[in-house]
Amino acid sequence: VQLQASGGGLVQAGDSLRLSCIASGRIYSMGWFRQAPGKEREFLTAITLYSGVTRSADSVKGRFTISRDISKNTVYLQMNSLKPEDTGVYYCAADHTALTSTPSERYYWGLGTHVTVSS
């Protein structure tokens, strides 16, 4: 399975941005991780494709929303009220089981899309 993420860019604090990730094959769950400069990759949110069940890190609840379009094998990350600390590389991940909060080499990973939030 290959993942292709898109939608990153340079925005100002308070702006919104939507990321997309397309999976090339059948997958059980997809989600998003973020790696800020000099920091470890952190879990943001994930969704089970067929049930639509989601879970998110406390740091993004209320601001970031994950959704999916099963027909397109695509998940979206709607990011609102962006802050400078949201700056980083956003990675799409997928697995044949539920994603956990810990990045795993077992997961499928996209190449990442850069998000820069200026103050």
Image (tube, helix red, strand yellow):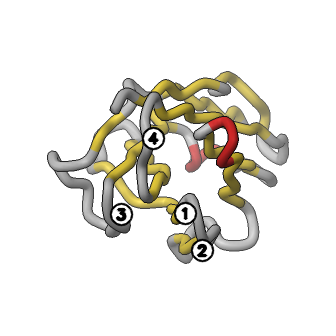
Q: Is residue 7 left or right of residue 55?
A: right
**Reading the chain from its start, which is encountered first: label 2 or label 1?**
1
Neighbour class for label 4 at 10 Å: few (<14), some, many (≥20)?
many
Residue 17 sits in quarter: top right
**Reading the chain from its start, which is encountered first: label 4 or label 3?**
4
- The circle on residue 99 is 3
Determine the residue positioned at 56% across, 49% down: 85
| Residue nearest the observer in this picture, 86 or 70 | 70
Q: Return the residue at label 2.
A: 53
Q: Estimate the spatial distance between the alpha carbons at disc 1 and disc 4, rounded to whole Å.
A: 11 Å
Q: Determine contact: label 2, label 1, CB under 8 Å.
A: yes
Q: Determine contact: label 1, label 3, CB under 8 Å.
A: no
**Reading the chain from its start, which is encountered first: label 3 or label 2?**
2
Determine the residue positioned at 66% across, 36% down: 72
Q: Amino acid at mark 2?
A: Val
Q: Estimate the spatial distance between the alpha carbons at disc 1 and disc 3, rounded to whole Å.
A: 8 Å
Q: Amino acid at mark 1?
A: Ile
Q: Return the residue at label 4.
A: 92
Residue 12 sits in quarter: top right
- Does residue 56 lie above or below 110 as drawn? below
**Reading the chain from its start, which is encountered first: label 1 or label 4?**
1
Q: Amino acid at mark 4?
A: Cys
Q: Residue furthest left?
A: 105
- The circle on residue 47 is 1
Q: Secondary structure at mark 4?
A: strand
Neighbour class for label 3 at 10 Å: few (<14), some, many (≥20)?
many
Q: Estimate the spatial distance between the alpha carbons at disc 4 and disc 2, rounded to whole Å.
A: 17 Å
Location of residue 23 in the rendering, given as x and y in whole percent from the top left corner: 48, 34
